[in-house]
């Protein structure tokens, strides 16, 4: 027997639609990049510059695929949180995530403060605004 998905609260309807559209776009881009990365490259008569350009293009495509896989993972996780009733709750603090942040980053798992702490702990310094540099 197939289970029916849980009813999503109306306050999250925009977020669900947005996440589903984002997932579709990322899947389409990933498919295009995967096809391009797998396509055979004609190496006949190519000089060193052509070979180097092909290598850079292939590395760029592979980087895009890794990024798209990461994006898909975050989007899928957000959709699961919507289904499970945990959407909009910071995974680090258990506090609600600001509505503005969820509008800007509908897949986010962390509040702004928790995300900054997470990045610092991971060794990735938070970008600073010009006003903060003084």
Image: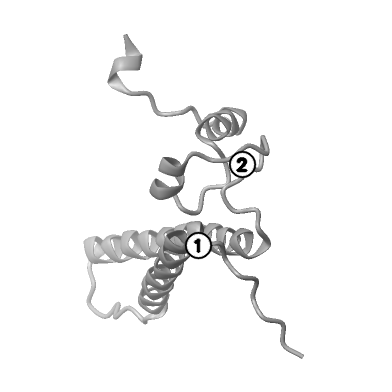
For label 2, the residue is: 90
For label 1, the residue is: 10
Q: Residue visible at 46% across and 47% down?
A: 102
Give the answer, above or below, for where 121 lies relative to 90. Answer: above
37 and 53: which is toward the camera = 37
91 and 41: which is toward the camera = 91
| Residue 89 as seen in the image, left or right of residue 51 | right
Residue 46 is marked as none
Q: Earlier in the sequence, mark 1 or mark 2?
A: 1
The x and y percentages for residue 118 are 59, 33
Q: For residue 55, which quarter of the picture? A: bottom left
The x and y percentages for residue 21 are 39, 69
Q: Residue lying at the far front in this picture: please name it.
A: 10
Q: Residue visible at 52% across and 61% down?
A: 75
User: Marks 1 and 2: which is nearer the front?
Assistant: 1
Q: Quadrant of the N terminus?
A: bottom right
The x and y percentages for residue 22 are 41, 65
Q: Kindly state the secondary structure of the residue where label 2 is placed.
A: loop
Q: Kindly state the secondary structure of the residue where label 1 is placed.
A: helix
């Amino acid at each position: 027997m197939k289970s029916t998905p849980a009813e999503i609260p109306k306050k999250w309807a925009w977020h669900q639609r947005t996440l589903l559209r984002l997932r579709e776009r990322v899947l389409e881009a990933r498919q295009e990049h995967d096809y391009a990365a797998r396509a055979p490259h004609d190496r006949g008569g190519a000089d060193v510059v052509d070979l180097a350009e092909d290598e850079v293009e292939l590395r760029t495509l592979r980087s895009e695929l890794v990024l798209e896989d990461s994006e898909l993972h975050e989007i899928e996780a957000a959709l699961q949180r919507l289904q499970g009733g945990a959407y909009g709750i910071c995974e680090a603090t258990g506090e609600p995530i600001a509505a503005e942040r969820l509008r800007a980053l509908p897949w986010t798992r962390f509040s702004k403060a928790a995300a900054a702490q997470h990045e610092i702990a991971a060794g990735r310094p938070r970008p600073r605004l010009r006003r903060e540099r003084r």
